[in-house]
Amino acid sequence: MPSFRLRRFSNAAILKRIDTALLMRFLDPYREFLVTQRGLPWPDEPDDFDHSALAGILMSPSIDTPEELLDALYFVDNLADPDCYDRILGEARDAGIEVCEDGEDPSPEDLTLRVWLADPMILERVHAEMYRTKPKAFLSFFATREDRPDLLFPEDAVRTALENELNDWFQWKKKGRGARVFPFPKEDGFWFLVRHGQRIKREGTVEADGDSGSVFYRPEKFDVLIYYPETGELAIYTETKGEQAIYCKLFGKHLFNDDAFFRFESPIAKYTLQPLIGLGRDTLICSDVVGIESIDLYHLEYRRDSELDNKRTVGGDDVFADIETNGPDLTELGLHLVKAKFRVTFTGGRQRIIGIEPPNRASFDRETDNSMIHDWMTKRGFIVVSSDGVITDAEHGAAVALA
């Protein structure tokens, strides 16, 4: 059950714009609930349908509202938008579903209802791409094998089996079922969006008559996974360690027939901050990276062996200048660099913040910046793993020293 805030389908005027026979066909699987438990009059003829009564019911869902109905309403309500129209129509036609007769121009609401009735996965896929949360921090986990098979676009049976096991896990974590996996092949790797629910929330509301009420809903979340075939890396954006572990296990199991394919425990280091010690200010050089104009180091965290629980921070417009004046000496024995943040100015003046946190975490304001940032980090030596997935002794030693 996603976060439930209907913009259109709780408005009687908008409901009246929908073909009533189509609307009744969409609601028919939930007729018993709507009629018996919510008192919706169900007419014999579409012309007698009470749109205002339906709007009132949809305005105030409760915990006993069927989850399937909430899912259906959520998607058709969010995507019944002119901005989504062409994409939905194109996806339906690519799937061999003709939802418009010759010369017909259905409203966005009618189109989404027709497509949902024909194939709900089309709307779920469009929603995944257009309304997903932007990733922030990726953690990288590498394959345990060098003989990695090619990753093909997963067949429906493979994706369904993966979703079923994910649903079992999310249900066990009290986050409900309904997880969906959306694969998207891209130039830099194979991207997966995983839509799933979170724990149910209850919020107080003020009803139309001024009385106090409440709504129950399950917030929706998107996780992002990227598989890079050249290095055997699975980069994961999610919030909990448990989700990272289950993704490593189940994506390895269903995509590569090996639930230990990705190394989750004691992960191989991908990132190092050693270049800040060895190269200093030269790590900010970016003239050899297309699309990046300048880079500044504005935040650096470190700790000493003698102060394991006490991280210290150097911050400012020019961290290197501050270190030269006030310290610390980055070559000091027993000093470890923990995290660095950089301000990146792209061609055209757009600025973004990126962070590097050994051994395997990097954060980006936008995942679309990933390719350019990855190029710069590789050229300046922040990437420990080479393009073919090999870790040299020197690189591995530097990573361990900073871990």
Image: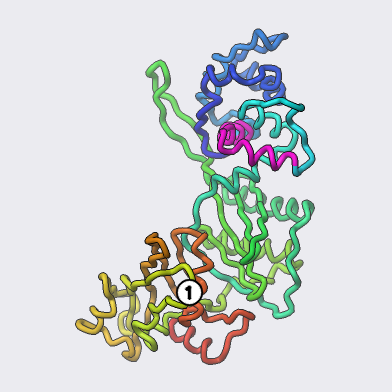
Q: Position of residue 206 (x, y in %)?
A: 39, 24
The relative height of residue 54 versus residue 258 in the rendered view (above or below) is: above
Front residue of this view, candidates 235 and 39: 235
Residue at 29% across / 75% down in the picture? 312
Q: Position of residue 337 (x, y in %)?
A: 37, 80
Q: Position of residue 64 (x, y in %)?
A: 58, 29
Task: Identify the image's colour scheme: rainbow, by chain, secondary structure or one colour.
Answer: rainbow
Quarter of the image containing the C terminus?
A: bottom left
Residue at 70% across / 17% down in the picture? 21
The relative height of residue 224 versus residue 402 in the rendered view (above or below) is: above
The relative height of residue 171 versus residue 242 in the rendered view (above or below) is: above
**Residue where numbered disc 1 is placed:** 289
Q: Position of residue 134 (x, y in %)?
A: 49, 53
Answer left or right for 188 relative to 303: right
Residue 235 in view here: yes
Q: Quadrant of residue 293?
A: bottom left
Q: Secondary structure at mark 1?
A: loop
Answer left or right for 193 relative to 203: right
Q: Quadrant of residue 342?
A: bottom left
